[in-house]
Image (cartoon, rainbow, N blue to C red):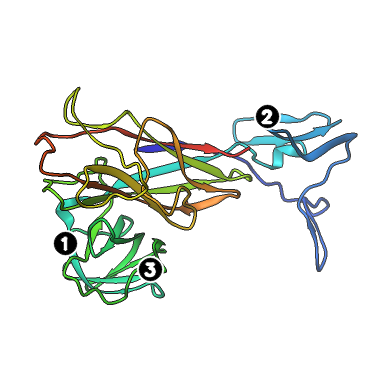
């Protein structure tokens, strides 16, 4: 799922030896100035944020055949919020073992690069299962069998540099649907999704998660939501946990339900903020053998 709110400005510059658009000194720069009768750079209430100027003349937007003009003090700034949320899920058919990982150099060495390309997201999973460690990144370069990402997010301080369990994998993270695959009783399984948030909102953003109800096999059959904060073997349970520097609802497995839940937030502008959402499930011998499905919605809002 991709959600975009984009703002684009066209402008022009005039060059004149007798007029300067900015005043500078060795320590300061005034990019633009204006003499007015009032206004504030930041007026706020519980629900709104306002930038205002009182007393300007001939302000606004003007155009001609070759030029566009934004006249006025505030016209030099763009306060229209830009919000971008990109979602991607684990592609199970790209499962590739890795032999080395560095959180310092932001690199992972894989046994094959067949499924990977630059500018795509990957997830690294150590000890795959209900207690796995997960990190995510976007591939910046591929040299030999080494994938280097722009940055790691998720459980960066917990994942090991040298995988040794035989259940350590790298996945491409670009799918629109997440899947656990075939389930077996008391063998917990996982699947991972990731977010990528960018915004110019000065007060930041929040991301929320909400489902359309239970993970259902039919109108009368569903997997039980986790209720004790931990999806574990020997119990029929389904839930998720969030990891990352901007993650919220952390430290426990929560129910993926119709109750909306905040999973990520920041109080400032964002440039590719990410979290990993690890979905977890365990079934028991009496769980009906059905095809279980659920729709999950991610919602991004600007903070005010």
Nearer the camera: disc 3 or disc 1: 3
- What x and y, as percent, mark residue 3? 41, 36
How far is disc 2 from disc 3 in space, using C-alphas? 55 Å
Residue, disc 2: 62
In the current view of this chain or complex, which residue is farthest to the right? 37
Q: Quadrant of the C terminus?
A: top right
Question: Which of 68/160 is in front?
Answer: 160
Q: Which mark is residue 114?
A: 1
Which mark sits nearer the N-terminus, 2 or 1?
2
User: How many other residues sit within 10 Å of disc 1, few (<14), some (14-19) or many (≥20)?
Assistant: few
Residue 103, placed above or below residue 47: below
Residue at position x 31%, y 42% in the image:
226
Q: Which mark is residue 158?
A: 3
User: How many other residues sit within 10 Å of disc 2, few (<14), some (14-19) or many (≥20)?
Assistant: few
Question: Which of 289/46 is in front?
Answer: 289
Question: Which of 79/30 is in front?
Answer: 79
Q: Can you tell which quarter of the image residue 298 is in?
A: top left
Secondary element at tag 2:
strand
Left or right side of 293 for 46? right
Residue 256 in view:
yes
- What x and y, as percent, mark residue 128? 22, 60
Residue 145, placed above or below residue 266: below
Which mark sits nearer the N-terminus, 3 or 1?
1
Question: Which of 191/65 is in front?
Answer: 191
Residue at position x 90%, y 34% in the image:
37
Q: Quadrant of the N terminus?
A: top left
């Amino acid at each position: 799922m991709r959600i975009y709110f984009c703002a684009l400005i066209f402008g022009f510059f005039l060059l004149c030896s007798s007029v300067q658009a900015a005043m500078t000194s060795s320590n300061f720069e005034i990019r633009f100035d204006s003499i007015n009768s009032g206004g504030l750079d930041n007026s706020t209430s519980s629900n709104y944020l306002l930038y205002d100027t009182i007393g300007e003349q001939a302000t606004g937007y003007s155009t001609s055949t070759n030029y566009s003009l934004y006249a006025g003090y505030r016209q030099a700034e763009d306060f229209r919020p830009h919000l971008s949320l990109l979602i991607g899920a684990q592609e199970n058919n790209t499962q590739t073992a890795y032999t080395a990982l560095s959180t310092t150099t932001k690199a992972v060495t894989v046994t094959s690069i067949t499924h990977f390309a630059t500018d795509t997201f990957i997830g690294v999973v150590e000890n795959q299962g209900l207690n796995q460690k997960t990190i995510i990144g976007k591939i910046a370069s591929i040299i030999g069998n080494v994938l280097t990402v722009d940055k790691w997010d998720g459980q960066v301080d917990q994942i090991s540099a040298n995988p040794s369990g035989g259940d350590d994998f790298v996945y491409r993270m670009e799918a629109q649907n997440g899947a656990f695959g075939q389930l077996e009783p008391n063998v917990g399984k996982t699947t991972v999704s990731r977010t990528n948030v960018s915004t110019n909102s000065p007060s930041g953003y929040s991301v929320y998660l909400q489902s359309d109800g239970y993970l259902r096999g039919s109108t009368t059959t569903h997997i039980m939501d986790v209720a004790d904060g931990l999806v574990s073997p020997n119990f029929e349970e389904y839930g998720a946990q969030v990891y990352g520097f901007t993650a919220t609802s952390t430290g426990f497995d929560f129910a993926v339900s119709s109750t909306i839940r905040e999973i990520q937030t920041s109080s400032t502008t964002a440039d590719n903020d990410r979290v990993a959402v690890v979905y977890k499930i365990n079934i028991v011998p009496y769980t009906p053998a059905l095809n279980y499905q659920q729709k999950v919605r991610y919602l991004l809002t600007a903070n005010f």
